[in-house]
Amino acid sequence: MKTSNVLFEVGLEEMPARFMNDTKKQLKHKTIEWLKEIRLAYKHVSTFITPRRFAVIIEGLTEKQVDQEEEAKGPAKKIAIDEDGNWTKAAIGFAKGQGKSVDDIYIKEMNGTEYLFINKYIEGKTQDQLLPQFKDIILSLNFPKNMRWAEQNLRYVRPIKWLVALKDNTLIPFEIAGVVTSNVSYGHRFLGEKFVINNPLDYAKLLEAQYVIVDTNQREQLIVNGIKALEQKNDWIIPVERDLLEEVTNLVEYPTVFSGSFSKEFLDIPQQVLITSMKEHQRYFPVQSGKGDLLPYFIGVRNGTAEHIDTVSRGNEKVLRARLQDAQFFFEEDQKQTIGHNLEQLDRMVFQEKLGTIADKVKRVVAIASIISSELNISNQEQAQVERAATISKFDLVTNMVNEFTELQGVMGRKYAEIFGEDDIVAQAIEEHYMPRNAHDEMPHSIVGSIVSIADKIDTIVGCFSVALIPSGSQDPYALRRQTLGILQIIQHHQLDINVMDITQKVFLIFEKNNIPTAEKSEVLEQLESFFKQRAAYIMKEANIESDIIEAVLVNTLTDFSFIFEKAKTLKQKKADSNFKEKQEGYVRVLNLAAKAKDSQKVDVSLFINEEEASLNQAYLQVKNKYNEAITNKDAAAIEILTPLVDPIHRFFDHTMVMDKDEKIRHNRLALLQLIAEDVKKYADLTKVQWKQSKA
């Protein structure tokens, strides 16, 4: 069958770099799904994006849909033919609806009932009929923010300037927001010009001639190669962070790497400030020596050629110099204040309308940190460090430097605390209490920093839930999901023996004393436990633990997450072990029947009437204490201690009618099973584990 190559390009005003990766992914996914939906086969789909355009090329697209024969099912025969053997209105309507006559009807039996059927021949549509529908794919793309322009009603990421739609050398006609498709595209805003495309496969080559590298990977590689060339030439080390590289790649259409320098006097400013100034404000890569020391140079990427690159470098040096002069001034001015003075200013900073000021939050964090310190039974010295770190944890929020570079909160707190003579551990904890800042960030290294971090985060979480600021959908203005993940990650990382829900209850009491809650306590605590469990499940899924195991270990109250996580990992191994299957089956039999027990009762050995129930009871009594001691000690291998119960359990069920007619005997047997089940559930609810999924 004849095939064609197709190009769609949307030209826009510059898109934000942060939108582009997702837009490209959406474009490819939606194009492939659309091609499946319209039943056109193809060889390959390629997508391209720059700040001023996104495009898709479909290679080897078949000329038309495959013709289809379809069997349409109609009403049952009994309502389609009347008593006289004539077609009813139901039959006539069915045939008419299929574009056929009653002469085309035939009858088939399905599941004992006869139905009417009609065979339909559906001729496949051609490319020319289908390709203009791609307009809907363009309009279906989602962006974090949209805008309107001129008199248009369309809301889109940026104003559309041109549209290219070609099948080989033939125009595909459609229009969006007053812009009509053509075969004319535009090159680099300053270096290129408009040009005609006659063959979709020439798209990338034609654009490169107009100073546009439309392939994202090619642009990125040009940047990486330019950086490596400067490293080799100058014996530099240039750290390339993935996020910054992606952003710079998405800011330019024709990248050229250049270097610049700044005065050595600025190296007296903390390195984090210099790096932040370069990366966040100017999108520069910092330069280091072989020893890792920051050097007075930077690497930038120009959107253009190497022509007059020295002039470009000097212009960027001038801009950076002004930035660094500001930073130097802020750094010097901040040191003229004291920590005490800064803490007084926190009374003027509102954290949240109903939750008070930052100063109010700090007081709560100090109290919460004290509760956690007691739970962990840390030394007196560490308790004092926790209290001091929590007390001054937010003092840098009122500094000039953090006001200018908000991403340096905590970082500058540590630096200034060191300058003002605070204990090194306390200073370190000020920076660490913001960790982890995202799902893959590093954890606090010290126990002091970990405690203050948990205290700060749990104050925000419980506080927001108390005043009904609960995340919904994509709305999470206080980053409660991220902060909950952070708490659990810290607990897991440091294997902290912390009862999360016990802490949240105590924190809620702190809010109650301050007359803050607007919701009922039990309702809030229930919401909080569900919220924490959702984040716990997320962490375990990220560790490739199956959903059924996650459900099994989260069946009880969320207490010590590090222990829960270890139990989940152990069950994951057990699930793949065929030798454990018999044990699991025994435990599940107990759990299922124990659910029929009405109330907790004591086991009366005098009511045993066969050897099997007495043997099971004896086996349980022999392992009970050792098992519960292992659970208390957070031993993930505790489940193995119950192994001696497996054979007695199976013999019990093979020779014992649990639901005996005699009520006393029945309740006594259920009571025994209930005791065993309650202990098994301390580990996990094994009825939730789908062992049939095991690959063993």
Image: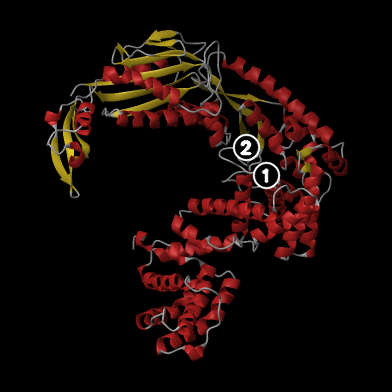
Q: Position of residue 134 (x, y in %)?
A: 36, 21
Question: Viewer-proximal residue, 137 or 47?
Answer: 137
Residue under label 1, please give it: 468
Residue under label 2, please give it: 289
Q: Is residue 246 visible?
A: yes
Q: Quadrant of residue 16?
A: top right
> What coloring was used for the rendering?
secondary structure
Q: Amino acid at mark 2?
A: Ser
Secondary element at tag 1:
loop
Q: Amino acid at mark 1?
A: Ala
Vertical arrangement, residue 353 with respect to residue 134, above or below: below
- Please name the residue shown 48% across and 31% down the image: 22
Question: Viewer-proximal residue, 52 or 413?
Answer: 52
In front of the other: label 1 or label 2? 1
Q: Which mark is residue 145?
A: none
Q: Position of residue 526 (x, y in %)?
A: 62, 55
Q: Is residue 187 visible?
A: no
Separation of marks 1 and 2 at Cα, in angstroms: 51 Å
- Please name the residue shown 35% across and 32% down the image: 33
